[in-house]
């Protein structure tokens, strides 16, 4: 995949660079495409780097907080995969490798901002304060999600690919109608993957968000794989460049760099809240695991790729930064590990004791109030279940 | 003993036979290539036919089905895969407004000989958006042929007929049957579209079934046979064309009709079957026509609930007993 048109590449820079479109056109064309315009604030080695458009003042305590988030969400993910392998969950979509993209963006949100996730946003869910057990209920198949999206301003997981981009755009337009854009405004973030960019819905959301200047941030985690389909099958241009064609800024961020994800998302969300419209953020990352636990990536991709990405681990670089730059004691890391183990243990124990829903509950919430047909079906079903009562007693 | 294969293997076998026979047959869909399909129903095809004929696509149902239509207009015979039948809704414009109307609107000048294959139905606990039986959606659109096989041999034979059909065909493969086994089909096996099969002969009651409900009906018939009741099971195989002659002939023998369908009772295909029997076979009946269908609720995720929403052998047995006692 090559950047074919330097002008095109340059026209889709971050908001700050809008007025100086030709700035780095030549540089972009010269560099390997995966590094073109990649915002990075923390190298894989844990070295802090500056970026003119994204200054980030962050205290050691805040970095420790991010580190704790990263480790705990990885642990929840690890525990969930194990639970699936042991038959306790029906399926699990692992976030392994994408922790920084999710924690960085998730921690950039204010309490009144609204997030629309895919089914892999366990790290964002954690940042929004959702009990991980709610996620496990879904993947155990005892509920369809079942959390109240307004409680943590975190919508239900959307499983049909890309639909949530339009939900988010409509929600953002609702915020506009409410007059909640401007100083102290609200905004929406919507998560999707590289695969979703091939969906019509996503492109339609880009158009509507753009022409309505809707306060929505499109956060695309480009993890390189749409199940077995590589990025080359989704796009001939870097995904962030797509935004320019729709008329809003796009920026590519190192998705394994929690600092950069935090800074870039903060800036885009703030712009949206203030009425400057949408931004597309492409968090360049890698799906280290399978698409879901039903998938076997060894059938279609090379392990060399995986090995190369292991060197860019999102957690290790923060640890190195904390050790080298902030001189954090090793005991801190032990404490975080212990806390993560405890959360993991809680998740495991709660999952194994999760009750099945009551049979008659299947008739609930189909309509706001029960229709005659629904009531009749339920009554018939109750009678049917009652017909087994004597049978069981006789056994 | 004949060779036994799974329903899942029969899908790739059926496609492969047609691809070997006719170079104009191509497949397109998500993850159907090296990955072999998320349900492994295209396993081996990529290795045999290569990327020119087994085309992996981006995630866009509209692109897959819309392009299949365009390709079909050039004389190619596309076999498009929509991963889950629920996602037919993502490309419904092409399936409801474009593809089935093309022959009609061009006065027969343009044909779109394509097959859209899709994994349909519940029983695996995939939740409200990945478990629906949506064959009744397709039934509502004149111009589409609608096929839903119950056995591996029928998968092969009906795929052959579907791919050779000059009309567009929606081909529903039932997720709950993928692991089921049966005899494979002999070379050249072809099951014409619109010919129901009598899966079990009987004289006391007729059970009309489709896809996943065929094994349910057979199990219920076995259970009743212990009590001396001979149930006849008619496997419709196709909803369009609908073989009502076989159904009416069976009802003529048994005078009693139970329809077992996995789609919801409201708007389910059984309503169409029942209306035709009520109209054309009223004098044949000794009892009301009964239907066992899914409850009119979204499919629950929880398997304990899903098992109760869709038809079960126990529900079919209970319905048969009440029908026989009428």
Image: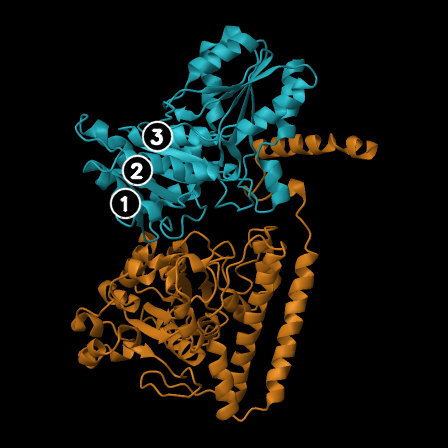
Judging by the rendered image, the residue that carries numbered circle 1 is B53
Q: Are marks 1 and 3 in contact (CB under 8 Å)?
A: no
Disc 1 residue crowd, few under 14, some 14–19, many 20+, Cα 10 Å: some
In this rendering, does residue A33 appear at all? Answer: yes
Q: Chain of mark 2?
A: B
Res B19 label:
2
Residue A332 at x, y percent in the picture: 61, 86
Q: Colour in which chain B is shown?
A: cyan
Judging by the rendered image, the residue that carries numbered circle 3 is B160
Q: Are marks 1 and 2 in contact (CB under 8 Å)?
A: yes
Residue at 47% across, 12% down: B248
Residue A91 at x, y percent in the picture: 55, 54
Q: Is residue B274 above or below residue B78?
A: above
Q: Colour in which chain A is shown?
A: orange
Image quadrant assignment for residue A206: bottom left
Image quadrant assignment for residue A367: top right
Residue at 69% across, 19% down: B226
- Left of B44 or right of it: where is A369? right
Mark 2 or mark 3: name the one nearer the start of the chain.
2
Q: Is residue B205 above or below residue A275?
A: above
In front of the other: B163 or B253: B163
Q: Chain of mark 3?
A: B
Mark 1 or mark 3: name the one nearer the start of the chain.
1
Assign the C terminus of chain A to one quadrant of the image.
top right
Q: Secondary structure at mark 1?
A: loop
Cα distance in 3D space between marks 1 and 3: 17 Å
Disc 2 residue crowd, few under 14, some 14–19, many 20+, Cα 10 Å: many
């Amino acid at each position: 995949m090559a950047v074919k048109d330097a002008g095109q590449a340059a026209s889709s820079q971050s908001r700050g660079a809008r007025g100086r479109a030709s700035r780095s056109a030549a540089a972009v064309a010269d560099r390997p495409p995966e590094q073109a315009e990649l915002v990075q604030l923390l190298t894989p080695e844990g070295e802090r780097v500056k970026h003119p458009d994204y200054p980030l003042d962050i205290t050691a305590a805040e970095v420790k907080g991010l580190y704790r988030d990263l480790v705990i969400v990885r642990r929840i993910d690890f525990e969930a995969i194990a639970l699936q392998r042991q038959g306790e969950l029906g399926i699990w979509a692992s976030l392994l490798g994408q922790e920084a993209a999710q924690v960085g963006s998730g921690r950039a949100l204010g309490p009144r901002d609204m997030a629309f996730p895919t089914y892999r946003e366990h790290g964002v869910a954690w940042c929004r304060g959702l009990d991980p057990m709610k996620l496990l209920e879904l993947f155990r198949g005892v509920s369809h999600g079942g959390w109240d999206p307004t409680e943590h301003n975190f919508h239900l997981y959307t499983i049909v690919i890309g639909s949530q981009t339009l939900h988010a755009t409509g929600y953002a337009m609702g915020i506009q109608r409410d007059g909640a854009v401007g100083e102290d405004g609200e905004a929406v973030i919507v998560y999707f993957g590289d695969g979703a960019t091939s969906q019509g819905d996503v492109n339609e959301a880009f158009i509507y968000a753009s022409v309505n200047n809707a306060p929505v941030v499109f956060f695309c985690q480009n993890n390189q794989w749409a199940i077995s389909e590589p990025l080359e099958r989704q796009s001939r241009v870097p995904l962030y460049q797509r935004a320019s064609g729709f008329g809003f800024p796009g920026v590519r961020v190192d998705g394994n760099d929690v600092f950069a994800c935090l800074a870039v998302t903060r800036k885009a969300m703030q712009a949206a809240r203030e009425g400057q419209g949408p931004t597309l953020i492409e968090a360049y990352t890698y799906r280290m695991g399978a698409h879901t636990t039903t998938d076997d990536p060894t059938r279609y991709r090379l392990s060399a790729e995986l090995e190369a990405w292991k060197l860019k681990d999102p957690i290790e670089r923060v640890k190195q930064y904390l050790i080298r730059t902030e001189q954090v004691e090793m005991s801190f890391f032990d404490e975080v590990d212990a806390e993560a183990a405890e959360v993991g243990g809680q998740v495991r124990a709660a999952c194994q004791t999760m009750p099945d829903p009551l049979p008659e509950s299947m008739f609930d919430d189909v309509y706001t109030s029960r229709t005659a047909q629904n009531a009749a079906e339920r009554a018939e079903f109750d009678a049917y279940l009652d017909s087994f009562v004597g049978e069981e007693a006789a056994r | 003993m004949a060779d036994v294969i799974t329903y899942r293997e029969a899908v790739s076998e059926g496609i492969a036979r047609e691809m070997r026979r006719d170079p104009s047959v191509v497949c397109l869909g998500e993850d159907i290539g090296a990955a072999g399909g998320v349900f492994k129903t295209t396993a081996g095809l990529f290795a045999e036919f290569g990327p020119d004929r087994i085309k992996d696509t981006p995630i866009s149902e509209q692109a897959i089905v819309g392009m299949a239509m365009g390709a079909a207009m050039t004389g190619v015979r596309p076999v498009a895969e929509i991963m889950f039948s629920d996602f037919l809704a993502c490309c419904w414009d092409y399936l409801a407004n474009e593809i089935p109307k093309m022959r009609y609107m061009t006065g027969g000048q343009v044909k779109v000989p394509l097959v859209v294959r899709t994994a349909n139905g519940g029983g695996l606990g995939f939740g409200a958006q990945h478990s629906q039986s949506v064959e009744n959606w397709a039934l509502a659109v004149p111009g589409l042929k609608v096929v839903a096989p119950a056995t591996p041999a029928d998968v092969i034979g009906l795929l052959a007929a579907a791919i050779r059909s000059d009309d567009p065909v929606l081909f529903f493969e039932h997720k709950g049957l993928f692991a089921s086994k049966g005899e494979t089909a002999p070379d050249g096996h072809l099951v014409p579209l619109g010919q129901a099969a009598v899966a079990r002969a009987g004289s006391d009651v007729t059970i009309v079934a489709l896809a996943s409900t065929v094994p349910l009906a057979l199990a219920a018939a076995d259970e009743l046979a212990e009590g001396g009741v001979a149930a006849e099971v008619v496997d419709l195989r196709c909803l369009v064309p609908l073989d009502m002659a076989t159904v009416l002939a069976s009802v003529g023998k048994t005078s009693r009709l139970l329809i077992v369908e996995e789609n919801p009772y409201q708007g389910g295909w059984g309503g169409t079957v029942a209306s035709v029997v009520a109209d054309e076979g009223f004098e044949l009946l000794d009892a009301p026509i009964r239907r066992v269908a899914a409850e009119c609720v979204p499919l629950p995720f929880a398997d304990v609930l899903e098992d109760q929403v869709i038809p079960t052998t126990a529900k079919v047995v209970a319905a048969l007993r009440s029908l026989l006692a009428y």
